[in-house]
Image (tube, helix red, strand yellow):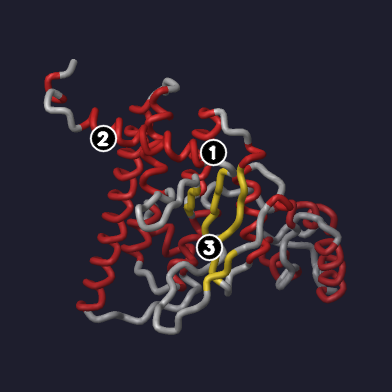
Amino acid sequence: MTHAPGKYADFEGLRERAVALRRAGLSRRQIRDRLHVDNNDILNRLLEGEPPPAWTKRPNAKDDLRERARKLRLQGWTYDQIQVELGCSKSSISLWVRDLPKPERRDPSEQAKLAAQRRWEHELAVRDEKRQQTKEAARQEVGELSSREPFLLGVGLYWAEGTKDKPHARRERVTFVNSDPRMIRVFLAWLDLLGVERTRIAYHVLIHESADVEAAERYWAEIAQTDRASFGKTTLKRHNPKTVRKNTGDDYRGCLVLTVRQSAELYRRIEGWWYGIVGAATAPDLRNRT
């Protein structure tokens, strides 16, 4: 295409105007029409180094894939590995990451280790999904409960986790200790079922001395749906230098101890209920029941 003589003679002046328009937010087409520049090569030279305004960038459905591909490439992934991970073509991957440094070539044994690791991670994910499916199916099998079922459950729960009376140490008092908030909720619901008023229950926390005591008290007060001010003095467990503690971290909140005041009669009934369950469950004709 021929142009009028001297049309672009003042190139620097024309570039200054083009740059000013670009920085003002005009598109290439708008700048071309405003300056009457019909040659794309000239327009490219005029706008060299000037990024386009944000509004001219069209959203791309593959932008997310592109960013993920670049991150994986920077981690040393090959085209084949990125293709398997993202499900896109090698040509697209090559276009997206061509400006990035090539990863160092690994020896076959290292490649095999990486492949085995990825297979194992996939296997773990499959196992975890099956595990969760089994748990959910079992949860749904429980269905609705009558009042008798939680009653029997609570007796067994107490006999497993509560304090028991011994001939050499009389403890006819209902005290329950646990670190599982769900167990605490079930136990409190069981006491409600028995008609035990919440005002008869005393609470205190049992926790390691290095833990956040105030945070633990707030946590257990919320679980028990009671005022933290109603808690008794927290019992601190001293550190034994010969042991390696595993119950550490922000999610460690110790145990909650629940004691029912004036509960000797209730304890005797619980013990009797338990022996009743044992006797019924081990009766000789148990298998013949319908």
Name the spot of residue 250 as percent of width and height, x first: 57, 65
Depth-wise, is mark 3 or mark 1 nearer the camera? Answer: 1
Residue topped by disc 2: 278
Single out the residue that lies furthest toward the bottom: 241
Disc 3 is placed on an element classified as loop
* Three-letter residue code for mark 3: Tyr
Mark 3 vs 1: CB contact within 8 A: no
State the residue at coordinates (38%, 30%). 152
Cα distance, mark 1 to mark 2? 23 Å
Cα distance, mark 2 to mark 3? 35 Å
143 on left or right of 50:
left
Depth-wise, is mark 2 or mark 3 nearer the camera? Answer: 2
Single out the residue that lies furthest toward the top: 290
**In the image shown, does 159 or 131 lie closer to the viewer?**
159
The mark total stands at 3
Residue topped by disc 3: 252
**First in residue order: circle 1 vs circle 2:** 1
**Label placed on residue 188:** 1
* Three-letter residue code for mark 1: Leu
Name the spot of residue 215 as percent of width and height, x first: 65, 61
